[in-house]
Amino acid sequence: MDYKNLINKLEESKHLISMTPLDKIVEIGFTSGMNQDSFVLDLCCGYGEMLKVWHQAFGIKGIGVDICKEFIDEGKILLKHENIDDISLIEADVLNWKSDKKFDYVCLSGEDFGGFERTIQLLEQYVKPNGKLIIGTRFSKVESPPMELIEFEGETLSLRSINEIVRKFDYFITSMASDTDAEWERYIMWSARRHLENLRNNPNDENCQDWCEKWYTSYFGFRRKYEGYVLLVIEKL
């Protein structure tokens, strides 16, 4: 086994807050036509890792926006370490942040601001004519998800329902990449380490304790079986 290569892959994905495998994120960029002229906006960008990956693979330029100071500060350090100055990260609430710039690609992964339709409407504010939207979203693996999933996550659409909404807005899905159990595990355990660190520093944080109980019960109880995650590229008719 090539242990050094394995460790390098683990290091590369350490700051990737996604259930989409790293190689599939690169594939999404390739199949959707990203290149050195592409200007990409990533809302709720986390550490800005998707932008960094696409920059390194295709030479894109971009802006990432996230409300979490920890993510933005760490992401800027990572970009500086890689000598990347074509990616800018901004600490802001994406619902209040505004820009007059238009982008070739507008992304939002893993967050839900009022449902899938609202997500499309939010991204459309920033996309150029003939630009593309990239949406990472949860989906139910069954048409009628269990009530526990709905109570924990809120709206949980099937892929069929997601496609119906995409078509309602006159878009077509032109690229997609699904999750894997391994990526879910990486994401859930990344969260576990963050929760554990917080509880070690704040042992009386009852809100965090309650959240951890719901988080793990939901994943091991029903999310793993009934919930998936997919990264979609959609293009206007």
Image (cartoon, rainbow, N blue to C red):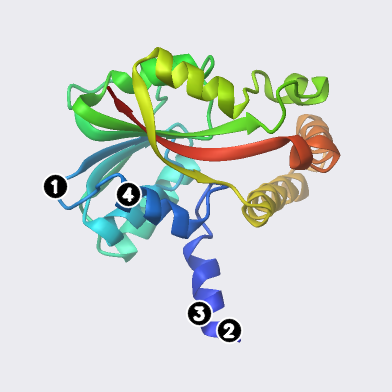
- In the rendered structure, find residue 5 and report the number of the disc placed on it: 3
x 39%, y 54%: residue: 27
C-alpha gap between disc 4 and disc 2: 30 Å
- Left or right: 229, with 70 as reference point: right
The amino acid type of the residue labelled 2 equals Tyr
Residue 112 pos. (x, y %): 54, 24
Which amino acid, by three-letter code, is at mark 4?
Answer: Thr
Numbered disc in front, either 4 or 1 = 4
Can residue 85 be seen here? yes
Q: Which residue is mark 4?
A: 31
Which of the marked residues, 4 or 2, is nearer the chain's N terminus? 2
**Considering the image in quadrants, where does the N terminus appear?**
bottom right
The three-letter amino acid code for the residue at tag 3 is: Asn
Label of residue 230 in the image: none
Residue located at (75% from left, 24% from top): 145
Q: Quadrant of the C terminus?
A: top left
Q: Report the residue at 85% width, 38% height from top.
A: 221
Q: What distance separates the C-alpha of mark 3 from that of mark 4?
A: 25 Å
Could you classify mark 1 by the number of other residues whose Cα lies within 10 Å: few (under 14), some (14-19), or many (20 or more)? few
Q: Are marks 3 and 2 in contact (CB under 8 Å)?
A: yes
Within 10 Å of disc 4 (Cα), the crowding (few <14, some 14-19, many 20+) is few
Name the residue beneath numbered marker 1. Answer: 37
Asked if residue 16 is positioned above or below residue 99 in the image, the reply reads below
Q: Earlier in the sequence, mark 3 or mark 1?
A: 3
Q: Residue under label 2, please give it.
A: 3
Q: CA distance from mark 3 to mark 2?
A: 5 Å
